Amino acid sequence: MRDWFNVTDTSRPVGKFWFGFVWSIFTILALILIWAFTGCAPKATTRVASPRTTPAPIATTTTIPAAAVQGVITYATTIPGTPEPTPVPTPTPPPTPVPTPVPTAVPSTGLAPLWQQGNPTLGHWYNANTYQCGGPNGTTVNGGPSQQSNGAVYFVLGVNGTQCGRDQLLPSPNNDGNPMYLANGAWYTWVFHYVDGSPNGSAPGMGLDTGADPDSLIWQIHGATEPGAPCTRIDFVNPKYYNAASFNGGKQSWAVFDCNYPNASGHVVPGSMQVYTPGVDVDWVVQVKISAAVNGGEVKVYKDGSLICDDISATYHNSTKSWWNYGIYKWRWEQNPSGSNMTKVQDTFTSMAIYPGQVLAP
């Protein structure tokens, strides 16, 4: 039995067998060990990711001088890890045109006024005379028209029997004591600002006169030898006498008359009756083509920028020429009873000018 298992004795068949078997096993084991240690065989262990080192962020700051390119944006922004974009020059857009403010209306022809209140050369005037009350200083009721230091003219009138119905002035461009006559066939434009009260706006102004007949006027064109009421004028009226009893609740209102629609006709120029509010200023523009012929003239009136009437009509009658004046004329006070319940009225014209032609329309 010992000889059977004697593997070193290769002279025997059994010894040869065992010797070869043992050698084969040894060789296989040796090869496995060699592969294991040399990395030639796949590893059976779980791979663990090695920590990686994050590269430092790329910090870029690009600055383009503002003066280098007109309209270029200057960049000074740092974005970690992001390359800075190259700025693209943006052309400066052309400036938006700014509209030139439109100045207050001036004569379209550039003409100078023919007469202008407060103008030391063109602004001469004198008091009206018939039923004109008071003297020239205007410091008290019935003191006459008074020129203020700022060029405004103040009119104030109080009841005094039947002798006080007027506080008006007559423009006299030549300062010769004669009124300003208006040429037949010619256009004229009056521009004025009316204050319903004293120069500082204190009451009363021209109303509200709630009497039976509160009629009065503030501006008129008068025939030179007119025996009766003038045609063309701006008035205060009681609406009920002019087929408009419900207008403005029947309260005293503005109205325009001309020779087609005179005061005595019981009608006003269509569209011209307007609400009067005590203490409220009004800007007036009046354009008139002068004529005594029926339908030979024209009257256009703008109140606070709105055209309130435009009528083809004669502008005076019973005369060969006409003149104009302004201020307070409350003719009802020349009658007894007066039909008025007011005892004092006043207004102020801060400006008044007359131009040749049809100009200054709003």
Image (tube, grey):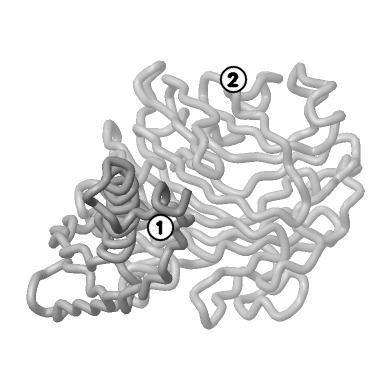
The residue that appears at 75% across and 39% down in the rendered structure is 215
- Please say if the residues under marks 2 and 1 sit with CB atoms less than 8 Å apart: no
Disc 1 crowd rating (10 Å Cα; few below 14, some 14-19, many 20+) is many
The kind of residue tagged 2 is Pro
- Who is closer to the viewer here, 162 or 312? 312
Residue 32: x and y in percent read: 32, 55
- Who is closer to the viewer here, 27 or 243? 27
Task: Find the distance from the CA under tag 2 to the CA under tag 1.
Answer: 26 Å
Q: Quadrant of residue 121?
A: bottom left
What is the count of numbered marks? 2
The residue that appears at 54% across and 57% down in the rendered structure is 193
The residue that appears at 68% across and 56% down in the rendered structure is 166
Pick whichever of labels 2 and 1 is earlier in the sequence: 2
The kind of residue tagged 1 is Ala
Q: Quadrant of residue 347?
A: bottom right
The residue that appears at 27% across and 31% down in the rendered structure is 185
Residue 136: x and y in percent read: 60, 76
Residue 122: x and y in percent read: 33, 68
The residue under label 2 is 270
SS at circle 1: strand
Q: Is residue 159 left or right of residue 149?
A: right
The residue under label 1 is 353
User: Can residue 114 be seen in this snapshot?
Assistant: no
In the drawing, what numbered circle is on residue 345? Answer: none
Residue 195: x and y in percent read: 64, 60
- Who is closer to the viewer here, 27 or 257? 27
Examine the rendered structure and indicate whether residue 136 appears above or below residue 348: below
Disc 2 crowd rating (10 Å Cα; few below 14, some 14-19, many 20+) is some
SS at circle 2: loop
Examine the rendered structure and indicate whether residue 335 appears above or below residue 39: above
